[in-house]
Amino acid sequence: MTLPDWLTMARVITAFVLLILLQACAHPPVPAWTAWLALALFVAAALTDWLDGHLARLWKIESDFGRLFDPLADKLLVAVTFIGLLGAGLLPVWFVSLVVGREFLITGIRLVAGQKGVVLSAEKVGKHKTATQMVTAILALLLLAFNPTLPAGRILLEVAVIITALITAGSGLYYLARNYPLLISNVRRS
């Protein structure tokens, strides 16, 4: 395995540590350091998302492992964080359901493609979706660390949720439309 692959795996492990921290944040009283540590871990993991792809392209060591697991690690990190933030009362159920549902849909498309011998790499629209989701997660984690009841913070988070929901839904529909011929075809590539 290459360094970019290890960074991807580190993001998967970080997701589970975040789950534990956010679970603790859902049950007050919570030590202040818990929310700050969750924020720091999420930001570090988000940076590895950029770094692993950058290094793989720079060193020309892109791999099927990276093409498959990098987007899965992103999905896991975001889904776990959003579920934890839902439990902490910062995100609405409809939003977390939309994000998780979209991720299951795209993972299903990737599985079908894989069975047909096709590895689907991440596309720009998916990268934009991931970026908005990560910004929304960072805003929510900042609010959790500072003061979850801060009115200005709640309004900013609600705006971010709406924008992220629109981009998430749009990217899912785009990905479905773009890969629909592959889904209905019985042809395998070799």
Image (spheres, rainbow, N blue to C red):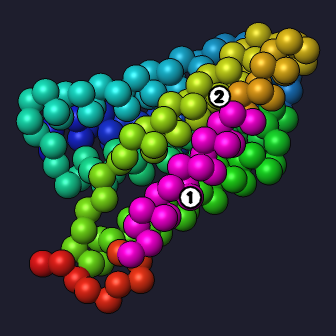
- The Cα–Cα distance between marks 2 and 1, rounded to whole angstroms, is 21 Å
Mark 1 lies on a secondary structure that is helix
State the mark number for residue 56: none
Is residue 120 in view? Answer: yes
Q: Residue at x 67, y 43 (%)?
A: 166
Q: Please state, as top left, top right, bottom left or bottom right, where the N terminus lies in the image.
A: top left
| 27 w.r.t. 174: above or below | above
The amino acid type found where label 2 is placed reads Thr
Q: Nearer the viewer, mark 2 or mark 1?
A: 1
Residues in magenta, as a range: 162-181
Q: Residue at x 85, y 21 (%)?
A: 155
> Measured from the top left, where is residue 152 in percent x and y?
86, 12
> Measured from the top left, where is residue 5 in percent x and y?
24, 41
> Measured from the top left, where is residue 173 in percent x and y?
56, 58
Task: Assess whether residue 168 is covered by the magenta stretch.
Answer: yes
The amino acid type found where label 1 is placed reads Leu
Horizontally, residue 102 falls left or right of residue 26, namely left
Q: Main secondary structure of the magenta part?
A: helix
Disc 1 residue crowd, few under 14, some 14–19, many 20+, Cα 10 Å: some
Q: Nearer the viewer, residue 19 or 173?
A: 173
Q: Residue at x 50, y 47 (%)?
A: 75
Disc 2 residue crowd, few under 14, some 14–19, many 20+, Cα 10 Å: many
Is residue 3 in view? Answer: no
Q: Which residue, given by chain and number where applicable, does mark 2 sit on?
A: 136
- Residue 38, located in which quarter of the rendered image? top right
State the mark number for residue 173: 1
Q: Please state, as top left, top right, bottom left or bottom right, where the C terminus lies in the image.
A: bottom left
Q: Residue at x 22, y 83 (%)?
A: 188
Horizontally, residue 185 falls left or right of residue 35, namely left
- Residue 59, located in which quarter of the rendered image? top left
| 123 w.r.t. 22: above or below | below
